[in-house]
Amino acid sequence: MSTTLFPSAASPLPKMPLPQRRSFQIKASSAQAFTEAKPRHGASAASLYEVLRVTANASPTEIKSAYRSLAKQYHPDASRSESDGRDFIQIHNAYATLSDPAAREVYDTSLGAARINFSRRRSSVGFRTDGFYSTRRWETDQCW
Amino acid sequence: MAEPAYTVASDSETAGEEKSSSPFPETAIGIDIGTSHCSVAVWNGSQVELLRNIRNQKMMRSYVTFKDENPSAGVSDQLSSEHDMLSGASIFNMKRLIGRVDTDPVVQSSKSLPFLVQTLGIGVRPLIAALVNNVWRSTTPEEVLAIFLVELKAMAEIQLKRPIKNVVLTIPASFSRFQLTRIERACAMASLHVLRLMPEPTAVALLYAQQISNQNVNTGSEKIALIFNMGAGYCDVAITATAGGVSQIKSLAGSAIGGEDLLLSMMRHLLPDSETLLTSHGLDDIKSVGILRVATQEAIHTLSSQTSVQIDVDLGNGTKICKVVDREEFEEVNRAVFDKCASLISQCLHNAKVDTEDVSDVIVVGGCSYIPKIKSLVMSICKKEELYKGMKPLEAAVIGAALEGAVASGLSDPFGSLDLLTIQATPLALGIRADGNNFVPIIPRNTAMPAQKDLIFTTAHDNQTEALIIVYEGEGKKVEENHLLGYFKITGIPPSPKGVPEIRVILDIDASSVLRVLAGVLMRGSHQPINPVMGVRMPTVDDGHGWCAEALHRAYGSSLDLVTVQKKI
């Protein structure tokens, strides 16, 4: 199962009710990390743009400020946050790819390919883009 | 102490998650334990306030004096003169010694301190002892720090009229996770719970974020700042990108160099061939070295405001030093230290992929920020005409820690003064031993925290059913250049040719900076593990950890080795 918070629908900036997590759930989610981490099969995988709640043609500045405001909401240290680290990691990973022009281009291409596959095959599993740009790029992890 | 004297906070699974448990959270206090001075600050509801001791001091000397029965720490103790601290009965520089083994160069250089630092050079903790009634009484840096923290806590409790439990401590960026556990241990001994450990420049970054968001209402523009923090024991550099109260640490670099090194090399310069005197620890020698130390320290302070200084001192052992030292000479003697500072700044800029023209503000704080050479070298590397004003060099870190204490305690401020966030970055890479003796990073340096990353490994031998996961932290290519954090074995790998089994290793750092290593064997073509996975909280090593890696190698050779898998794209 996946605990992705982000809706797969590309609705613009949905106001999402956040689940109230308590500390035992936080521990549980860290234990689930092994099975739920990177490959997110299934229906709930959102595109990186959806994760950051920006449109696919968002400017670098828009991406940056979207990342910042989401960080303030989902980073565990932020005063408003009720979240453990998972959501922030997802937000940061999305940002790491989309803020790097080269990585964003590759990601956009893969997104386009996935859309074509989707419409061609009409897969019942649904729209699936893994969430993350698949090649490990150390340098994209730290950009802002 | 009414509470159990020894609860190990580092073993608490819920560390850092307390903010959701109570509707009226206790505001964590910020503590900056410096190598030479220490300070405490707290959010008082509208701003950060520094606490003062009974002698009205905000900066307290970091030392503990051992006497017949009760040790007393620099929080309340009255030093009649600096010499009192140098009689051998006082332990100081705890922050330089904590969590280091006796082969460490920092420990080696501490042998010239007036108290006893005995090293055997075999990779165990050094013996540290204070002179009490002509007996070298052994102690540990953790114990000394704990005694100091107990006094600090008592002082804060009296002033704030409430029990103090949660603290945010600043730490040097170069501390290994093993050293962090020693700090946590000392806090636990003092009945304090560590809410956050913040690298010093990141605490300064949080204060900067607050000042910037106060200044411009228009939060759209991002400001890059370089923070250089050098105290008596450590030099740290950070690059931070700040906008809208959010400060993201782009890179961190640090090293155990500081005012103490400037002092030691200056002492050696003033008194050449003094090695025997410096390390002998005879009663008269301790006294002479103490006199030299105080005179040298005063001279260095004078050189911050004057271009030359007259040193005129009688060491009491027949040696008299009468010498004029000018600023150039001081800078030449300490050229290695200043070069290291410069290389840390360049490294930090490079790692952050930031050009000097992108840097809006250059912040120089810490005790060494008064040294003209330090200011000029930072400005010249950053190509700036002036430094950021608006922070008190000695108070910036503790104020940042107090802000983090308020933010992490879940407080908010109606005027938005606490609408702040520092997104921390890992100061060192984390990874495991693989491909022979290589260190394979899984979470690279300067990764935003919390973080989770994984890599797939495979077996090095045919029909290998077990593998050792040996976890290291550092930047070296070979494992021995890094800090060992711990190790464990995974078993039940199905017998198959080498390179076939898939062993997945996940490194997870949560918001409280707790590191967990998860490892398991995957089923062929699936992401499901065959057996229950291992989840190990790091570090697991204890004292004498310098030996563990060698012992493992002796016992197992390469039979339980792992190799990396080339990722399929």
Image (tube, coloured by chain):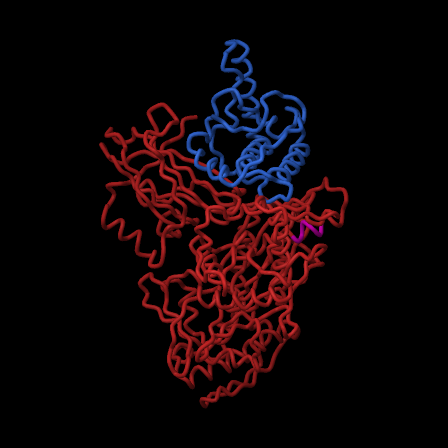
Q: Is residue B524 above or below residue B558?
A: above
Q: Quadrant of residue B491?
A: top left
Residue B209 lies within the magenta run: yes
In magenta, the rendered stretch is B207-212
Q: Quadrant of the C terminus of chain B?
A: top left
**Residue in view at x 62 percent, y 43 percent:** A78
Q: Between residues B311 and B424, which one lies in front from this camera angle?
A: B424
Pinpoint residue B399: horizontal percent, then vertical percent.
64, 58
Image position, residue A74 (x, y; %):
60, 37
Would you say A83 lies left or right of B219 here? left
Image-quadrant location for residue A62: top right
Q: Is residue B465 magenta?
A: no
In the visual, does B124 lie left or right of B324? Answer: left
Residue at (74, 47) in percent of width and height: B414
Q: Main secondary structure of the magenta part?
A: helix
Q: Report the residue at 25% width, 35% height from top.
A: B465
Q: Is residue B118 visible?
A: yes
| Chain B rendering hue | red
Q: Classify B388 as above or below B114.
A: above
Horizontal and vertical percent position of residue B66: 46, 76
Q: Residue furthest bottom?
A: B318
User: Residue B342: where, in percent of width, then height?
Assistant: 55, 57
Whether residue B385 appears in this view of the structure is no
Chain A, hue in figure:
blue
Q: Residue at x 47, y 76 (%)?
A: B70
Q: Indicate the quadrant where residue B20 lies.
A: top right
